[in-house]
Amino acid sequence: MLVCSCNYITDKDIKSVIAELLDEDCWQLIVPAKVYHAMGKRGRCCGCFPNVVDLIIKTTAEYHDARESETAEVVNFIDRLKRFHEEQQAAAVERRQAMAVARRVG
């Protein structure tokens, strides 16, 4: 499935990079910018980043399930990832709302 139409990146490409990053350090915090940097790409419109975060969460959970990591560590890590994702979504909504208000006022 095509995830990023600006850079023509598929979900398989992203999952592969995430797995490579996890092989380097399975407890590192992986964010879209790190994934794109590893592919030698840059976010352009960044509209795909929420989907990339979802892929990061899913792939990280699958990675740790396959390696039978300690459940408590995985749950804590996945909770942190989900919280980060929710915070980023909330910040994006706030920015959009602020821009809409500024347009109406200006």
Image (cartoon, grey):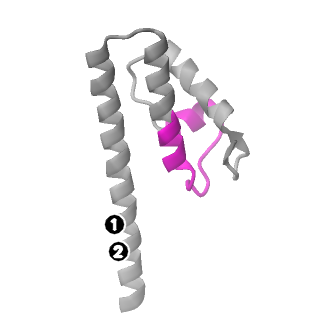
Magenta residues, as a range? 32-55
Three-letter code for the amino acid on which mark 2 is drawn: Ala
Q: Which residue is mark 2?
A: 98
Residue at the (61%, 54%) spot, across then down: 44
Rendered view: 60 above or below 32: above
Three-letter code for the amino acid on which mark 1 is drawn: Glu
Residue at the (69%, 39%) spot, across then down: 10
The location of residue 97, given as percent across then percent down, is 36, 73
Rendered view: 74 above or below 50: above
Pointer 1 with pointer 2, Cβ within 8 A: yes
The location of residue 93, given as percent across then percent down, is 38, 64
Furthest residue toward bottom: 105
Quarter of the figure with the N terminus? top right
Q: Which residue is mark 1?
A: 94
The location of residue 9, given as percent across then percent down, is 69, 41
Q: Is residue 106 among the parts visible in the rendering?
A: no
Furthest residue toward right: 8
Q: CA distance from mark 1 to mark 2?
A: 6 Å
* Quadrant of the image occupied by residue 12: top right
**The stretch drawn in magenta includes residue 67:** no
In the picture, the disc for residue 36 is none
Rendered view: 13 above or below 73: below
Q: Horizontal placement of 89 versus 37: left or right? A: left
SS for tag 2?
helix
The location of residue 38, given as percent across then percent down, is 60, 30
Q: Horizontal placement of 73 versus 36: left or right? A: left
